[in-house]
Image: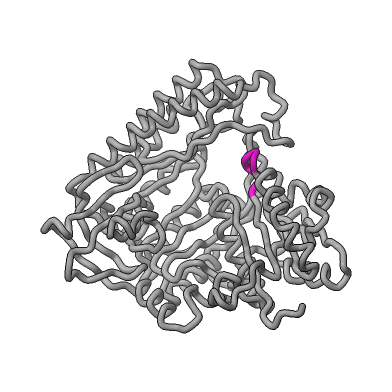
């Protein structure tokens, strides 16, 4: 390359898994000598990076259209600078493989979900051979945690506890692309968390395709609850979250572990997908609406203030108006604080793609709009019920798009609700990673407003090690993100952590 500084740009599509994989890709590239394009001063920043990586998703129908549209936009830059390299990875790469190069021959590297660690070598090989390199492994050889990581946050981090999925939902292509579930040993997970806390992290989110089936590979069906309790023993770790569990495998011991472990947050993302038992059967979801509602009742019995969110798919093949009304009934009964709602889209390679009775687009759109209306009512009622309550907010940058014009800051409450709060005149201004205690003055459908500080009510800032870590980055010239962390090697800690717990209510 002619440039003295080799730059990279990783563009992420999709879920938290992809976001975390992108942190690994950034770490790999920086270890190989690349510098993130966005980290350079504006005057020194070239128009396009030397390496552009697309980390793709394949869950929704428009994923391919979005990718090829973005690749098309980069083609002129590639023609102007043949030394520039374009790489495509992730689920869509695993699925489409060499099709990507045939549709976009200016792509240099295609790699799958099982070999993200190969990216630097594939880039070098493509540069040397002057031809595209396509490498797709069929199964995971090295757990991603062993790879370098370039985290986006100084005070919050993702931690993968498993990859892959053993379920066979008829609408989902993920198991075919991510493979069967593979679990990390508890000792390795806890070692990674302890290393993150030592760097200033105060919040971690445990990641797995079905996070609560953790332990299936080494034969301990209670392993996830034990892991949550073990996280409660890590000094300095203030908040623990996890995503996403599967209702069919959600056991009572996990609920009790959540309730009795103070740093496990009172928030739960529980994918419903449909409230119709007939549709759930067609989806091959191994639970029914009564069981789902029973889980929520048990959660709220032990954790009364838990905020529960969900995923919903509307317009699954064969869904009738009666089935849809059943979904609305379950949504009202569930009192979700929010919901991620999707219109069903055909994913080639899944059983549902071959089902008859595909629902017309106009009908799907109408039902989708009615679902949104109902969920908005539920979310608003749930948030209005919190008005007057004091909440602890972990401050974060960039959460509030209107913070500048409203003169507020933003962050997440313990139950993961988004809170926009006002800093009183002369009051301590918190740093990202610090904690702020404020009272909610207004509950909107999608967020809470906490102006108690400027209205003579509660306002208190607690400095944290997470805020210290964020501040240290600001005080370091040319920084802004944590340094690349080396991968966590396999270690010989016990397979099952020994924990002692004392009952403790979680507010």
Q: Closer to the camera, 301 or 7?
A: 7
Up-down: is 431 above or below 451?
below
Q: Is residue 58 magenta?
A: yes
Image check: 130 left or right of 357? Answer: right
Up-down: is 423 above or below 165?
below
Query: Percent from the top left, x then y, of residue 355?
Result: 69, 24
Q: Is residue 95 magenta?
A: no
How many labels were placed on the picture? 0
Up-down: is 342 above or below 322?
below
Colour scheme of the picture: one colour
Query: Percent from the top left, x then y, of residue 371?
Result: 44, 28
Query: Percent from the top left, x then y, of residue 328?
Result: 42, 25
Query: Percent from the top left, x then y, of residue 46?
Result: 64, 72
Residue 136, picture quadrant: bottom right
Image check: 442 left or right of 361? Answer: left
Q: Is residue 175 among what the camera can see? A: no
Specify the principal SS of the magenta part: loop
Image check: 83 left or right of 436? Answer: right
Q: Closer to the camera, 399 or 143?
A: 399
Q: Closer to the camera, 309 or 289?
A: 309
Image check: 289 left or right of 411? Answer: right
Q: Which residues are magenta?
A: 57-62
Rendered residue at 62%/76% (across/down): 35
Residue 26, picture quadrant: bottom right
Rendered residue at 65%/44% (across/down): 63
Rendered residue at 60%/20% (across/down): 318
Q: Is residue 11 among what the camera can see? A: yes
Rendered residue at 74%/59% (across/down): 76
């Amino acid at each position: 390359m002619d440039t003295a500084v080799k730059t990279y740009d990783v563009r992420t599509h999709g879920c938290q898994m992809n976001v975390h994989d992108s942190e690994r890709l950034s770490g790999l590239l920086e270890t190989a000598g690349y510098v993130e394009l966005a980290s350079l001063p504006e005057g020194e920043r070239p128009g396009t990076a030397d390496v552009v990586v697309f980390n793709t998703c394949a869950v929704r129908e428009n994923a391919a259209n979005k990718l090829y549209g973005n690749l098309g936009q980069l083609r002129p830059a590639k023609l102007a600078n043949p030394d520039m390299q374009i790489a495509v990875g992730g689920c869509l790469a695993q699925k489409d493989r060499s099709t990507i190069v045939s549709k976009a021959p200016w792509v240099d590297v295609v790699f799958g979900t099982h070999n993200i660690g190969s990216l630097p070598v594939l880039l070098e090989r493509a540069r040397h051979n002057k031809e595209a390199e396509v490498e797709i492994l069929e199964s995971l050889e090295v757990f991603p945690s062993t790879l370098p990581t370039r985290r986006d946050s100084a005070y919050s981090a993702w931690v993968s506890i498993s990859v892959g999925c053993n379920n066979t939902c008829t609408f989902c292509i993920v198991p075919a692309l991510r493979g069967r579930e593979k679990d990390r040993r508890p000792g390795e997970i806890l070692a990674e968390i302890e290393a993150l806390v030592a760097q200033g992290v105060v919040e971690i989110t445990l990641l797995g395709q079905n996070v609560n089936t953790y332990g299936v590979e080494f034969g301990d069906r209670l392993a996830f609850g034990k892991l949550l309790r073990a996280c409660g023993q890590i000094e300095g770790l203030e908040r623990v979250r996890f995503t996403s569990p599967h209702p069919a495998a959600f056991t009572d011991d996990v609920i009790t572990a959540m309730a009795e472990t103070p740093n496990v947050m009172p928030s739960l993302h529980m994918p419903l997908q449909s409230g119709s038992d007939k549709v759930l059967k067609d989806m091959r979801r191994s639970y029914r609406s009564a069981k789902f509602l029973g889980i929520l009742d048990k959660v709220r019995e032990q954790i009364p203030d838990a905020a529960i969110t969900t995923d919903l798919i509307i317009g699954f093949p064969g869904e009738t108006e009666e089935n849809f009304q059943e979904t609305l009934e379950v949504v009202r009964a569930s009192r979700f604080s929010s919901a991620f709602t999707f219109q069903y889209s055909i994913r080639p390679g899944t059983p549902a793609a071959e089902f008859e009775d595909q629902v017309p687009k106009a009908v799907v759109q109408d039902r989708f709009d009615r679902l949104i209306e109902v969920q908005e009512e539920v979310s608003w009622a749930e948030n209005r019920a919190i008005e007057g309550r004091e909440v602890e907010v972990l401050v974060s940058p960039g959460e509030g798009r209107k913070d500048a014009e409203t003169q507020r800051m933003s962050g997440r409450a313990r139950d993961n609700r988004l809170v926009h709060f006002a800093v009183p005149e002369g009051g301590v201004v918190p740093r990202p990673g610090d904690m702020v205690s404020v009272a909610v003055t207004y509950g909107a459908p999608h967020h809470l407003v906490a102006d108690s500080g400027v209205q003579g009510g509660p306002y208190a800032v607690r400095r944290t090690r997470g805020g210290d870590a964020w501040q240290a980055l600001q005080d370091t010239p040319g920084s802004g993100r944590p340094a690349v962390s080396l991968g966590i090697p396999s270690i010989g800690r016990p397979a099952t952590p020994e924990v002692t717990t004392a009952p403790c209510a979680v507010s």
